[in-house]
Image (cartoon, coloured by chain):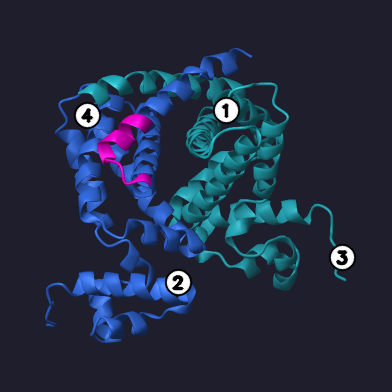
Chain colours: A cyan, B blue
């Protein structure tokens, strides 16, 4: 059984961000990341399954955390429950992430990283949707609300990383904007 | 220069759907699809770049069509413009797609197809966002409205394919539900 060195995962993450900034994501190898963090290429794969994942470490905790927050929410309607869950989980999430602006710049530079990020986001939507159904939402409503709140969550995370404002304030601003945007929909519908 | 046989693209699409239904997406090869459509494997790649794309043919027309619809919309506010564009382009799109339920079932069966579909959807969002900026929307508003209306569009297409109702009616129902959901957001925000 291989030993698991505490702090190695974080060292790998920092090494990867440094190397991506220096050479560009595509031109960095797993071997280079591992070497800079002082471990072997082989050991790297004990921490992350591939090169992409070093940028998304910790995100696998988000979908179950959001589902749990939905089930325990004191709110009563699906959109309020989902937004409350996004708020509670988002606050925890942003407190644990660092070098966000650099991370976002790397993701924006690579189609395969954007793809991985969309997959992560789809997993959050699916977890939200299933949890909302357990809270009594109908299939259609659960899917729609899950997608809508995923957009709010994603947008709030991006604004938080762009502006450095409080995550809560970002989510407030985003959900208020969504509400204002949706208010014009019936006019567009009537044409 | 290779000849381009009219109708071949459609024959490939039908052959692919038949084969995917018979054997499952993962167990069908490009060679089998080509053979069933009466062409060579090599010719297949004149029509589609890979096995996935045979299921998404025509979708590359959507982002420029939506962008054009945004630029020519008679509506005045970004959300109304974007929803109007989704309505006009969606109606054209659904008229040209067939065997939608089968197509959706195949996509739902394969992570790599879901990934491709998310990429297509992200390209629509990006096109909407850029076009809304050309219509005067600020960066933040353009991104948020583009994401919101992409959710409406996607959800309306899915309801249309699930229920067989008119696309317009599906988009009306979806946008009304989004509005109703967003109306509870401020309460959740106040807590």
Query: Residue, x 62% and y 51% (percent of image)?
Result: A56
Mark nearest the camera among 4 and 1 is 1
Element under label 2? Answer: helix
Residue A82 sits above or below residue B190 on the image: below
Q: Which mark is residue B25?
A: 2
Q: Does residue A168 belong to the magenta stretch?
A: no
Residue A9 seen in the figure:
yes
> Could you give the CA–CA distance between mark 1 and mark 2, rounded to whole angstroms?
35 Å
Please give the residue where the numbered disc 3 appears in the rendered image: A3
Task: Mark 4: give few (<14), some (14-19) or many (20+) Cα within 10 Å.
Answer: some
Element under label 4? Answer: loop
Task: Mark 1: give few (<14), some (14-19) or many (20+) Cα within 10 Å.
Answer: many
Q: Relative to the observer, which residue lies in front, A48 or B73?
A: B73
Please report, as a chain letter, where disc 2 is located: B
Mark nearer the N terminus (4 vs 2): 2
Do marks 4 and 1 both belong to one polypeptide chain?
Answer: no
Please give the residue where the numbered disc 4 appears in the rendered image: B135
> Could you give the CA–CA distance between mark 1 and mark 3, rounded to whole angstroms?
45 Å
Q: Across the whole image, how many numbered discs are drawn on residues?
A: 4
Please report, as a chain letter, where disc 4 is located: B
């Amino acid at each position: 059984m291989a030993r698991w060195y505490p702090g190695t995962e974080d060292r790998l993450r920092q090494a990867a961000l440094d190397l991506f900034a220096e050479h560009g994501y595509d031109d960095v190898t797993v071997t280079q990341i591992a070497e800079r963090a002082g471990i072997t290429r082989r050991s790297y794969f004990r921490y992350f399954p591939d090169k992409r994942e070093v940028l998304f470490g910790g995100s696998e905790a988000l979908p179950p955390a959001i589902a749990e927050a939905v089930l325990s929410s004191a709110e009563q309607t699906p959109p309020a429950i989902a937004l409350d869950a996004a708020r509670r989980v988002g606050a925890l999430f942003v407190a644990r992430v660092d070098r966000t602006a650099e991370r976002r710049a790397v993701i924006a530079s690579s189609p395969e990283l954007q793809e991985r990020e969309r997959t992560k986001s789809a997993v959050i939507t699916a977890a939200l949707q299933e949890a909302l159904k357990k809270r009594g939402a109908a299939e259609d409503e659960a899917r729609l609300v899950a997608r809508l709140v995923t957009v709010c969550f994603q947008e709030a995370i991006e604004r938080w990383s762009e502006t450095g404002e409080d995550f809560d304030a970002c989510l407030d601003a985003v959900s208020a904007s969504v509400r204002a945007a949706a208010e014009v929909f019936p006019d567009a519908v009537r044409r």
